[in-house]
Amino acid sequence: QWARVRARMRSEFGETAFQSWLKPLTFKGFHNGVVHLLVPTRFMQNWIESQYGDRLLELWRSENPSVTAIDVVHSATSSASHSAGHSGGHSATHGASGFSAHGRDGAAAPSANTDALNSFDAGLCAPLDPRFRFDNFIVGKPNELAFAAARRVAEADNVPFNPLFLFGGVGLGKTHLMHAIAAQLRESAPEKRVLYLSAEKFMYQFIRALRYKDTMAFKEQFRSVDVLMIDDVQFIAGKDNTQEEFFHTFNALVDQNRQVVISADKSPAELEGIEDRMKSRLGWGLVAEIHSTTYELRLGILQSKAEQMSADIPPKVLEFLAHKITSNVRELEGALNRLVAYANLVGRSITLETAQEVLHDLLRANDRRVTIEEIQKRVAEHFNVKLSEMHSARRSRGIARPRQVAMYLSKQLTARSLPEIGRKFGGRDHTTVMHAVRKVDELKQSDSSFAEDVELLRRMLEG
Ligand code: ADP
Ligand code: MG
């Protein structure tokens, strides 16, 4: 039966989806109407449940009408308990909710035994998303340096820089590249201890070690890795103890020539709430920025994803999306998924009109993507006042007027509410913003050169 279900899924969902999602499923058994299936990671568990769950159940039922439910569990969490000094096989855990639940399950404090070290990467490492690979990462100008550097780290030997520091805005592929490094190293250099985790989990582990008075084991574990990857390091900003511990771990590893890979949303120098000595060490190796996407890159990503999903989307629609959804890759993917889901659901093919209809909200949000900060900067430049005056309490005309214009444009060009705008202007209240909007409207009526000025600014900002 399982073989038949698999064969049908393969023909229904296509080879790509089958290879990445359905093939790794293993059949564990059938009890009381429930089919138990096992997958390697939590990511896959969630994905399979949400994307294929219903269809899987239908297929099973057509094979065997007594099936009432499908239970997908993942095997990643059971190995997490190894680091706590348990021994035993990688058995499935039922309904375990992943790595971070571990501290609350009453397990004994971790002890530094050899078992913990052997099962090290499986235990501490956050689960890897099997969708994040090098071969499906689309490379363009904005990310070529980051990509090349990540590839270099994944080739393991004689990496000429340490650490690798990847930075860029949200949804531009930092996590994708880090998972890709870890996945490739696991395959090509399984003897290496590769540890990937978010800065948040690093902190969680550290605090837990403090609580169990087990910081020695903690230190030993982290300092015995060959490759350490910490994602979203900005998270430890302002968290002094964690930062201190991270700094020592980082130094110990770099000094021993162990590879370190860090990601953050800003460059080392721009990170706030991080100590100067830390910033400077973070920048010692290769700092690679992932820049905002270009049209070409967005189109490339859309084409590749559409193909992976075996979705038949007219090139015009992909071009339209690449033009319109410029915020980040995550939103781009979200738009595509939504479109495909819609088309499948209502059984209609995708056209430009359906795309506009279905993605109305996303398109609008992307239309108005000027930020208040940008407006303040532009307006300050235009009127030749200091940016800080946008927030200051000074009320002299030469300063108050530009500030009012900036508030006016913030109202016109962003989706922010009056109180939100007020807050961005040195904590003024919404009536001040309202007054500014009225004032500027009035002035535009009475003073045509002022009106032209404001219009010019608006056009520049809308760009
Ligand atoms: P970040 O960690 O920088 O916030 P992610 O790595 O989570 O971003 O990326 C967000 C989503 O966009 C993921 O699904 C990822 O696979 C996808 N993505 C980002 N950049 C690319 C790219 N160049 N090619 C293919 N997919 C990408
Ligand atoms: Mg990320």
Image (cartoon, rainbow, N blue to C red):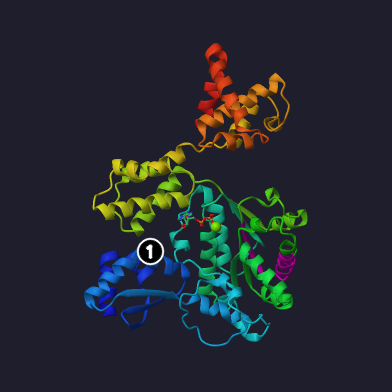
In the picture, measured across the screen, residue 143 lies left or right of residue 51, that is: right
How many numbered marks have been drawn onto this rendered protein structure?
1
Q: Position of residue 126 (x, y in %)?
A: 55, 69
Secondary structure type for disc 1:
helix
Q: Residues within 10 Å of mark 1 (few under 14, many from 20)?
A: few
Q: Which residue is mark 1?
A: 50
Point 29% across, 47% down: residue? 314
> What's drawn in magenta, residue-wise?
245-263
Residue 463 visible at all:
no
Which image quadrant: the N terminus?
A: bottom left
Q: Amino acid at mark 1?
A: Ser
In the picture, measured across the screen, residue 399 lies left or right of residue 153, that is: right
* Above or below: residue 457 compared with residue 373: above
In the picture, measured across the screen, residue 311 lies left or right of residue 321, that is: left
Q: Check the image and name the residue furthest to the right.
A: 277
Q: Position of residue 297 (x, y in %)?
A: 45, 48
Q: Check the image and name the residue furthest to the bottom.
A: 88
Residue 365 visible at all:
yes
Q: Is mark 1 within 8 Å of ligand 1?
A: no
Q: Position of residue 414 (x, y in %)?
A: 52, 35
As for residue 384 lying within the magenta part, the answer is no
